[in-house]
Image (cartoon, grey):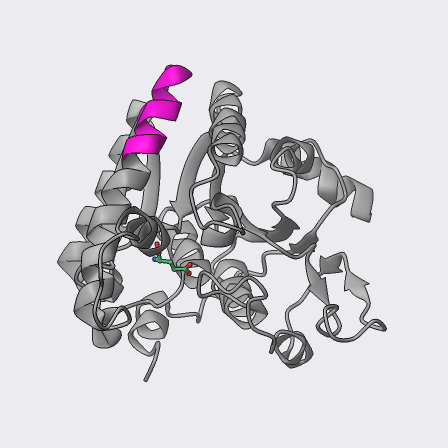
């Protein structure tokens, strides 16, 4: 299949998981929510739903939104776990309030699913989570997923939403995962520090060398994902049979362009590996 044909085949994807990071949802200067971008994102997602496709959004931004909401308060030890957990409780509710409002403007329904490592590792939890996703999709609702930061400490956290979104794609048998980021895709090296770095439009088969390209961390200062977490996501997604794209969220309209076959971002082709053990992989995170 030629590159053109591969891209054109993205038009046929039915169940799509889209991940957006905190840095894409906030104004860099103030840290406040960027309502125009949020509005554009929701409009794109509703339009994808209107094409008869199923959409799951993995959205970060809870801790950032909570921190912003409480900015006037004197928060002692603002990095302490309990403070972060409290901020995420405040921010997650605020984020969902905004999403609910925006989705309802286009006559769609947003639903919240919060997960931890245990959601996958525990058989009953995983079974229930999958059923909930399936039922929501059947109802035509848009599940909005985040880590349950209010209770997730190191031992039970997935840790970043790139990995979380690939786990969600695997759990729900999604056809495509799109990671929206502040970078155009995968480069041979970090383009922010190495002007010689070359862009890679297509990864047919993930290899060790791609993981070495992904050592850099996030350039945004908010959120937890760098290129290495995106490579972990690629490993999970491609091994469980899901194509994945890393694309720049600078222009949210990239979503409909990608689904129309536009050659932007880096496409990682699915290579289903029957021996890949999702539960074991998640269990092993941070160990
Ligand atoms: N779950 C975190 C939040 O909503 C973000 C994690 C991430 O950006 O990877 O604030």
Horizontal side of 23 relative to 159 (left or right) equals right
Q: Which of 270 and 133 is in front in this view?
A: 133
x and y percentages locating residue 265 in the rendered image: 70, 51
Q: Tell me, yes or no, whether the highlighted magenta stretch contains residue 108.
A: yes
Residue at the location (47% across, 24% down)? 46
285 to 180, vertically: above or below: below
x and y percentages locating residue 246 in the rendered image: 62, 54
Q: Which of 149 and 172 is in front in this view?
A: 149
82 to 30, vertically: above or below: below
Horizontal side of 125 relative to 8 (left or right) equals left
Which of the four quarters of the rendered structure image does ligand 1 lie in? bottom left
Q: In which quarter of the image is residue 216?
A: bottom right
Q: Which quadrant is home to the C terminus?
A: bottom left
Q: Give the range drawn in magenta.
A: 97-109
Residue at the location (53% across, 20% down)? 51
105 to 180, vertically: above or below: above
Q: Tell me, yes or no, whether the highlighted magenta stretch contains residue 228.
A: no
x and y percentages locating residue 268 in the rendered image: 64, 57
Q: In which quarter of the image is residue 165?
A: bottom left
């Amino acid at each position: 299949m030629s590159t053109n044909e591969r891209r054109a085949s993205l038009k046929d994807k039915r169940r799509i998981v889209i991940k957006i990071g905190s840095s894409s949802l906030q104004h860099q200067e103030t840290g406040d929510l960027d309502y125009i971008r949020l509005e554009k994102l929701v409009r794109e997602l509703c339009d994808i739903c209107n094409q008869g496709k199923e959409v799951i959004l993995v959205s970060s931004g809870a801790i950032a939104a909570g921190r912003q909401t409480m900015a006037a308060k004197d928060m002692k030890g603002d990095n302490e776990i309990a403070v972060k957990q409290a901020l995420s409780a405040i921010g997650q509710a605020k984020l969902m309030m905004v999403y609910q409002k925006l989705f309802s403007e286009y006559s769609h329904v947003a639903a919240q699913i919060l997960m931890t490592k245990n959601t996958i590792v525990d058989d009953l939890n995983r079974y229930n989570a999958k059923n909930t996703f399936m039922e929501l999709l059947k109802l035509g609702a848009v599940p909005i997923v985040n880590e349950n930061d209010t209770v997730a400490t190191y031992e039970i956290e997935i840790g970043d939403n790139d990995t979380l979104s690939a786990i969600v794609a695997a759990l729900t048998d999604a056809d495509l995962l799109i990671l929206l980021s502040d970078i155009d895709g995968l480069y041979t090296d970090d383009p922010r520090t190495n002007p010689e770095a070359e862009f890679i439009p297509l990864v047919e088969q993930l290899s060790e060398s791609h993981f070495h390209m992904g050592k850099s961390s996030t350039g945004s200062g908010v959120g937890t994902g760098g290129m290495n977490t995106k490579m972990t996501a690629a490993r999970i997604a491609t091994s469980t049979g899901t194509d994945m794209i890393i694309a720049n969220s600078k222009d949210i309209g990239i979503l409909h362009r990608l689904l129309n076959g536009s050659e932007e971002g880096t496409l990682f082709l699915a290579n289903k590996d029957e021996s890949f053990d999702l539960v074991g992989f998640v269990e092993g995170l941070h160990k």
